[in-house]
Image: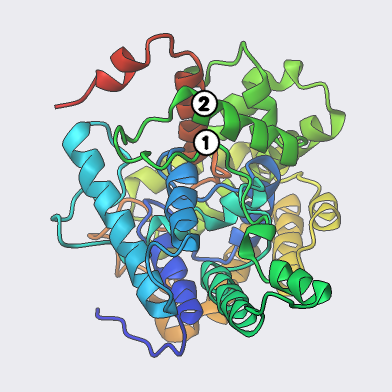
């Protein structure tokens, strides 16, 4: 199927691309609209992260490129600068691909002249703002537009106040238009020659800086807690549940412990719902789904006891239909009424997608296509956060920079 749309601005285009790229992730399709709760937990545990982030280095590469744009290096026209930013990000990809075999380089599967639809400056921008590397709540486009206007105002005032005997207050006005007085960035790791030894690995000083920004600005998050801990090895934990169970005793914040328990309890309910969804779609003819249902069905009441009121009270989720769906399913499970659970799931999908696209209303048509459709349980962005944390800790541990950044190089 080909998908097309008409957009009227770069912001509109980016919103559509953000949605489309979510569908590229394995198991990411949210057939029943449960992702609102997933994202609320993910933002709480791992703020500034996203499922399409690959490596921590981009939290610095993007600022470096944009800081150069601010100097005027890429010109003074908005569209020219925005296009040049894309070109510079693509060139960073080309540089890194020549120096390393490590994974996580965005656009590595494309040829040198091609570039991704969703660039690092889009993927990492929210995190860059949340970690206060960029201090203002602006889009990239608004930021570039602002610095262009500030430069134009400065030039105009300089031109209009060139007389030697200009009034003192006029000189003050000139200074007010100087963009150097606008402290957009908190990024002291920038160096003019940063491309000379560019790889996907963080430099030790970059790791130290990024870690400090996360801890300072997201101190109550699980992301910050793990970065502050010296004895947590994420290699031991391949899922959010394993992580939360493994580190729970070392988490002193009772609210964080409660939230981890709540997230895992919610996943138990999600597992029941998504398994039943697949059972309906495959018309009971999928061995994998049937085996999973057999494991769940004798413990449904315990697995469905998540405190939904607690979730909707803790998070600003304004979705009454989702709230009602989850409560109704939970009640039906507690009443041993699986037929009602099935009816609720069918209605929920129909309400979201309309009848033609609702898979549960076309049972049995997908048996040859997949073993599983949609999500299974939520990861809460642990996987991308894990890679970012490991990048920071790996660079922190570096003693010999040349040896570290030489490994994997051609």
Image-based side of 131 in relation to 286, left or right: right
Is 385 above or below relative to 70? above
The picture places residue 270, in percent across and down from the top left corner, at 60, 50
- Position of the N terminus, as image quadrant, is bottom left
- Mark 1, secondary structure of its residue: loop
* Label 1 neighbour load within 10 Å: few <14, some 14-19, many 20+: some
**Residue at x 36%, y 39% (from the top left corner):** 193
Foreground residue among 22 and 148: 148
The picture places residue 154, in percent across and down from the top left corner, at 61, 75
Instruction: Report the coloring of the rendering.
Output: rainbow
**Residue at x 30%, y 32% (from the top left corner):** 197
Is 198 above or below relative to 7? above
- Position of the C terminus, as image quadrant, is top left
Q: Quadrant of residue 131?
A: top right
Rounded to the nearest angstrom, the CA distance separating label 2 from label 1 is 7 Å
Image-based side of 312 in relation to 56, left or right: right
For disc 2, the marked residue is 205
Foreground residue among 281 and 167: 167
Is 318 above or below relative to 263? below
CB-based contact (under 8 Å), mark 2 and mark 1 = yes
- Mark 2, secondary structure of its residue: helix
The picture places residue 263, in percent across and down from the top left corner, at 69, 42
**Residue at x 80%, y 77% (from the top left corner):** 167
Q: Is residue 118 visible?
A: no
The picture places residue 249, in percent across and down from the top left corner, at 75, 16
Q: Earlier in the sequence, mark 2 or mark 1?
A: 1
For disc 1, the marked residue is 189
Image-based side of 183 in relation to 100, left or right: right
Q: Is residue 24 visible?
A: yes
* Label 2 neighbour load within 10 Å: few <14, some 14-19, many 20+: some
Foreground residue among 307 and 112: 112
């Amino acid at each position: 199927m080909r998908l097309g749309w008409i957009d009227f601005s770069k912001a509109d285009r980016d919103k559509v691309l953000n949605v489309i790229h979510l569908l590229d992730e394995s198991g990411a399709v949210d057939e029943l609209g449960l992702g609102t709760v997933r994202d609320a937990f993910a933002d709480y545990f791992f703020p500034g992260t996203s499922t399409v982030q690959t490596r921590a280095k981009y939290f610095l590469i993007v600022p470096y490129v944009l800081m150069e744009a601010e100097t005027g290096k890429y010109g003074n026209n908005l569209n020219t600068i925005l296009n040049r930013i894309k070109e510079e990000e693509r060139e960073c990809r080309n540089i890194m691909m020549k120096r390393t075999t490590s994974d996580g380089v965005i656009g590595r599967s494309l040829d040198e002249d091609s570039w991704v639809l969703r660039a690092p400056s889009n993927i990492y921008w929210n995190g860059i703002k949340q970690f206060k590397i960029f201090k203002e709540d602006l889009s990239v486009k608004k930021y570039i537009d602002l610095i262009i206007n500030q430069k134009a105002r400065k030039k105009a005032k300089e031109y209009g106040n060139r007389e030697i005997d200009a009034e003192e207050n006029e000189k003050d006005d000139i200074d007010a238009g100087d963009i150097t007085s606008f402290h957009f960035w908190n990024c002291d790791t920038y160096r003019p020659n940063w491309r000379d030894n560019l790889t996907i690995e963080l430099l030790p000083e970059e790791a130290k800086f990024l870690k400090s920004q996360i801890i300072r600005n997201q101190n109550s998050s699980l992301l910050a807690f793990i970065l502050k801990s010296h004895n947590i090895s994420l290699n031991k934990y391949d899922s959010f549940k394993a992580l939360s169970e493994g580190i729970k005793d070392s988490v002193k914040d009772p609210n964080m412990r409660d939230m981890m328990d709540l997230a895992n309890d919610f996943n138990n309910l999600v597992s029941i719902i998504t398994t039943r969804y697949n059972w309906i779609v495959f018309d009971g003819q999928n061995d994998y789904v049937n085996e999973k249902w057999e494991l769940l069905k004798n413990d449904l009441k315990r697995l469905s006891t998540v405190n939904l009121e607690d979730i909707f009270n803790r998070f600003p989720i304004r979705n009454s239909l989702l709230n009602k769906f989850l409560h109704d399913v939970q009640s039906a499970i507690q009443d041993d009424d699986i037929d009602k659970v099935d009816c609720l799931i069918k209605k929920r999908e129909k309400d979201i997608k309309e009848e033609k696209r609702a898979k549960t209303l076309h049972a049995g048509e997908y048996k040859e296509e997949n073993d599983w459709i949609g999500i299974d349980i939520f990861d809460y962005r642990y996987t991308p956060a894990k890679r970012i944390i490991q990048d920071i800790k790996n660079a922190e541990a570096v003693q010999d920079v040349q040896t570290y950044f030489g490994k994997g190089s051609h």
